[in-house]
Image (tube, coloured by chain):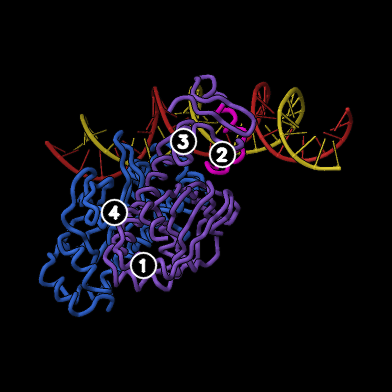
Chain colours: A purple, B blue, C yellow, D red
Amino acid sequence: MIQEIKNSYGDFFEEELLEEINRIATFKEIPEGFEIIKPGSYIRFMPLIIHGAIKVLRTDNDGDELLLYFLEKGDTCAMTLSCCLGHHKSEIKAIAETDTKLVMIPISKMEEWTTKYKSWRNFVFDSYHKRLIEAIETIDSIAFLNMDDRLLKYLRDKIKINNTSVIHSTHQQIAYDLHTSRVVISRLLKKLEKDAIVKLNRNNIEILQT
Amino acid sequence: MIQEIKNSYGDFFEEELLEEINRIATFKEIPEGFEIIKPGSYIRFMPLIIHGAIKVLRTDNDGDELLLYFLEKGDTCAMTLSCCLGHHKSEIKAIAETDTKLVMIPISKMEEWTTKYKSWRNFVFDSYHKRLIEAIETIDSIAFLNMDDRLLKYLRDKIKINNTSVIHSTHQQIAYDLHTSRVVISRLLKKLEKDAIVKLNRNNIEILQT
DNA sequence: ACCTATATGTAACAAATGTTACTGTAAAAG
DNA sequence: CTTTTACAGTAACATTTGTTACATATAGGT
């Protein structure tokens, strides 16, 4: 497992810490579409992403959803950090965007390691920083962009995360992520197709221009 | 200064740390309306709020603005934390909402203290957590609420922060914070007045129902 | 008291987004 | 092969939000 972590996180962590992770953490493989974090649930493990991608959504009581951001190799979920350190409930939902490999750290080790290892402390600070920046970029999108530009940004983020130019999603799924309706997405996608930016097929969207 | 900090932060910090803050930090009084952080500027101090309130806005290149959240006594600005620890540029703007008293910590001490003091580490983690939660609540508002409810929420947040039932703002100022136009705010405020939720006067808005 | 800045009220219209309803069509299931 | 289900296309309309234009009102300076 040490080598796997090094592949994804470089030499960020000290050898000592790596060995401790190796001893204590568990390795997990998650299939695409699996719901890793459910809203309202308590979290006992903090996931380090070794391979793949996870999408993180905000949910409210009425079943409304909104994509917050994607997590990649080398990332961790700052909301999980918050939950772990503050022992709060999850207010988000996390779904495996692709098949994903995770290292699960038990929360009991979290505080201990922030005291013990400088690299771990920096990793946690850095993760918070990244997530805060991402959250604010999400605010930028919904506050300052129209739906057509938000859709385009979404499609581009998605092909980047999945490392492909074809998106396997239905219009309805996209509508959920952007918190709008299927009809609106179909309408805007059709416009993008007219402008030769995408090519539409059943269950997939090909991105022609990046 | 130690007593001032204790009044605002309780016994959260160790005596030792308090003394170090007292020795190193500078005390500052800021008048209402003063621009504490400008977008694009580098930040050399981290402000701890002793008294008063600060509003934090997101800005983009076109001069668009959006209120992110208010900071109160006991808070600090996590974006500043990010900037300090990561040495990034500010992407936000901070303005004194009321007359405000601050303790300014030089960033050089930041990392040192996170290693040295457990309470400081926890304070920093806690601040990040709070700001992340607030940012996500802002996302909730703009994603899930219509402008009338956003306005109402804004007014309520404002009277809470200012500890008064009269808001001294023009419609234009509110429009900037919510990233909409003055006419829209006037229209919606008039509706709230019809519903006996507010009373409108020149340069101030009285909130009748909380 | 008069002038001027700024603030507010409001109508009329434009644009963006959301909703409903119905169509056709491809894939999956029987 | 037929039936069913899920997906996508599109028109017509409703609602929300944004824009322009102008009228009116109030405070402050002279």
Vertical side of B171 occupied by B126: above or below: below
Instruction: Find disc 2 in the rendering and name its residue.
Output: A174
Using the image, tell me which numbered label, if any, was put on residue A150: 3
In percent of width and height, residue A87 lies at 45, 70
Q: Tell me the magenta residue range.
A: A172-189
Vertical side of D4 occupied by A2: above or below: below
B60 left or right, relative to B40: right
Instruction: Find disc 4 in the rendering and name its residue.
Output: B79
Nearest the eye: A20 or A141: A20
Q: CA distance from mark 3 to mark 4?
A: 24 Å
The quarter in which the N terminus of chain A is drawn is bottom left
Q: Earlier in the sequence, mark 3 or mark 1?
A: 1
Vertical side of B192 occupied by B49: above or below: below
Q: Earlier in the sequence, mark 3 or mark 2?
A: 3
- For label 2, the crowd category at 10 Å Cα-Cα, with few meaning under 14, some 14 to 19 and many 20 or more, is some
Residue A185 within the magenta-colored segment of the rendering: yes
Kind of residue at badge 4: Met
Callout 4–callout 1 Cβ contact below 8 Å: no
Q: Secondary structure at mark 3?
A: helix
B135 left or right, relative to B52: right
Q: CA distance from mark 1 to mark 2?
A: 41 Å
Q: Earlier in the sequence, mark 1 or mark 2?
A: 1
Residue B115 within the magenta-colored segment of the rendering: no
Using the image, tell me which numbered label, if any, was put on residue A19: 1
Quarter of image, res A143:
top left
